[in-house]
Image (tube, grey):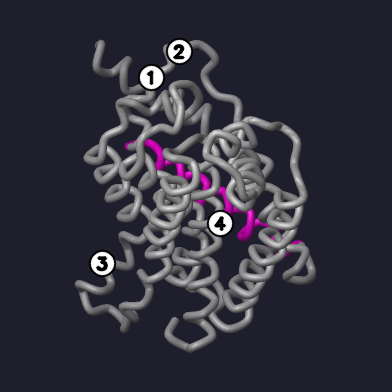
Amino acid sequence: MKTLKKITDSFWTSFGVLSRIPGKKHYNPDFSLFGFFLPLIGILVSLIVAGTFSILSPLLHGVFTLGAAILFIQYLLFNLFHFDGLLDSADALFYNTSKEKRLTILRDVNAGSYALFTGVLYIFLKLHYLISGTEFLLAVKPLDPIVMAVLFSYPLSGRIAAGIVPIILKPARKEGMGSLLSKYRFLPFLFGTGIALFLSLGFVYFRIFSHRGEISPFVFLPFLGAVLSGLIVSLLYKKLVGGFTGDALGLSVELGELFHLACFVELIGRGVL
């Protein structure tokens, strides 16, 4: 019973940190399995994004409106915390100052000019890539399950990216989100990531191994954006801050999602999907 309670407490703790959906109110905060649940919650985000697309695509006219609606639902339920990490990171990392001053900037609730510029540019790029992907799905390969699965797995890539950072870096300060992940371990994160990837693309593996249809090996390439963004954020925060914070995780989520979408659009542009 103690083990089960530990697992459920860790799930609700992770869910409460990573989403704005009301969950269980009474539980003991436990971050020991945060790395395991992080990619699995990414699956939930992907399902909601794909469900939003499936429900609204017959109702809305124009891919811009559809893409904006998908992002609105996603950010309302999940990504506003992560977007705040992107904005705070832009203000702190672009500013030419000491590590101590950057940590102070990361605590500041006010957004500066770097945050404003980065946030506007980021949303523009993300909306552009999401519109391009949904337009391809609707016009060229309507409801192709493989293309749809790869496209709408971009939230999973973002959570995988965030899970890489605490493996590489130590917390930048003794309080805050970083300090809460002192028990973060690689193996639970690896196990959770493996389950999440199988759940999101398991039928793709089945079609490859059963030789039912030709599947391009490039279908898995967008997920490398998760690794790339996790490494980039880790290097930046190590050099400029000295460790990771909760904002580093938010930045990783946003970059992982953007890199996934950008890679997907590049692949369809080259005709390999």
Judging by the rendered image, the residue that carries numbered circle 2 is 27
Q: Quadrant of the C terminus?
A: bottom left
Q: Mark 1 belongs to which amino acid?
A: Asp
Report crowding for label 2: few under 14, some 14 to 19, many 20 or more residues within 10 A (C-alpha): some
Horizontal side of residue 27 vs 183, given as left or right: right
Q: Earlier in the sequence, mark 1 or mark 3?
A: 1
Q: Mark 4 belongs to which amino acid?
A: Ala
Asked if the residues shown at circle 2 and circle 3 are in contact, with their CB atoms under 8 angstroms apart, the answer is: no
Q: Residue at x 50, y 53 (%)?
A: 155
Q: Secondary structure at mark 1?
A: loop
Name the foreground residue: 46 vs 87: 87
Judging by the rendered image, the residue that carries numbered circle 1 is 30
Q: Which mark is residue 50?
A: 4
| 40 to 65, vertically: above or below | above
Q: Residue at x 67, y 54 (%)?
A: 71
Q: Quadrant of the N terminus?
A: top left
Q: Is residue 39 magenta?
A: yes
Judging by the rendered image, the residue that carries numbered circle 3 is 206
Q: Residue at x 75, y 35 (%)?
A: 110
Mark 2 vs mark 4, CA separation in Å: 30 Å
Q: Mark 2 belongs to which amino acid?
A: Tyr
